[in-house]
Image: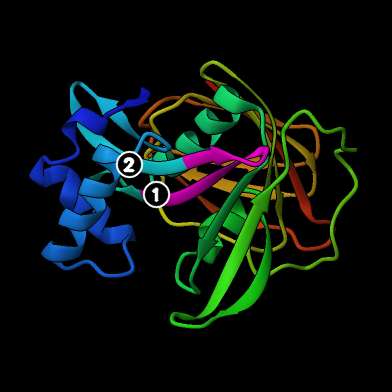
Amino acid sequence: MFQDIKPRIAEPDIGKIISYAAFDGSPESIAKISDEYRTSGALNFHGWVESGKIAGICGFEVHDGKVEIHLISVAEDKRRQGIGGAMISALQAMYGLPIEAETDDEAVGFYRKRGFETTEIMHPRRGKRHICVLRASTEKINIYDLPPLPQADELTTILAVSGNIRIERIISTGQISGWYDQIETEFVVLLEGNALVEFENRTAVMTKGDTLLIKPHERHRVNYTSGEPPCVWLCIFY
């Protein structure tokens, strides 16, 4: 569950998760960041909480008709479970506004995979950076309007968010994945292309029009996606 955790920001485990996203991960810098969030009325600090334990954190600000993410990070033992994407979706559901973030080369792929448009800039102190912008999910699109292909990474567009339900379009052009262990149920429709999805006890061979139900924590990975035609996935998470 995505909720306000600002009163807990001084906890050591939260400080460790903040350090993964901070430009300077030193203890002094983390203490300064924590103080800024604790004392600011404009800065929000939410977390993804599972059974009382913090699995991910998100520091953000709502201003000028947008949500600006300043920090987003997931605990090391909770990665590849969809928590980062779930926090982005929760922000969309809460505010219905465009979401903006600034990041580096290492993390820009996270945003691109979730449908953010990225623009490279040169920061006076930090060097090359990327401004990432995700449109508001209320805007109309045609699901078969594709960007120039192929792309280096999968492209994800969040189509709609309501409560714990999220609908995404994912475009693959030959990409494969590591093992996923997601916290959500995922219902998949392959609208175009061909793919192989491997589970621990079976492999799903998918062609245009096939559907697949993936249960929470059912480990799986994508072993093949066609590049021509590209794979166009409609994925419903709940």
Q: Residues within 10 Å of mark 2 (few under 14, many from 20)?
A: many
Q: Is residue 198 above or below residue 101?
A: above
Q: CA distance from mark 1 to mark 2?
A: 6 Å
**Which residue ends up furthest to the top in the rendered image?**
163
Residue at 85% over, 65% down: 148
The structure residue drawn at horizontal position 11% and vertical position 40%, both measured from the top left corner, is 11
Front position in the image: 201 or 53 = 53
Residue 134 x, y percent position in the rendering: 67, 47
Q: Which residues are magenta?
A: 61-72
Q: What secondary structure is the stretch in magenta mostly built from? A: strand
Image quarter where the N terminus lies is: top left
* Relative to 183, 138 lies left or right: right
Q: Amino acid at mark 1?
A: Ile
Residue indicated by mark 2: 57
- Residue 173's disc number: none
Q: In what element is the residue under mark 2? A: strand
Q: Is residue 123 magenta?
A: no
Q: Is residue 44 left or right of residue 39?
A: right
Q: Please give the residue where the numbered disc 1 appears in the rendered image.
A: 72
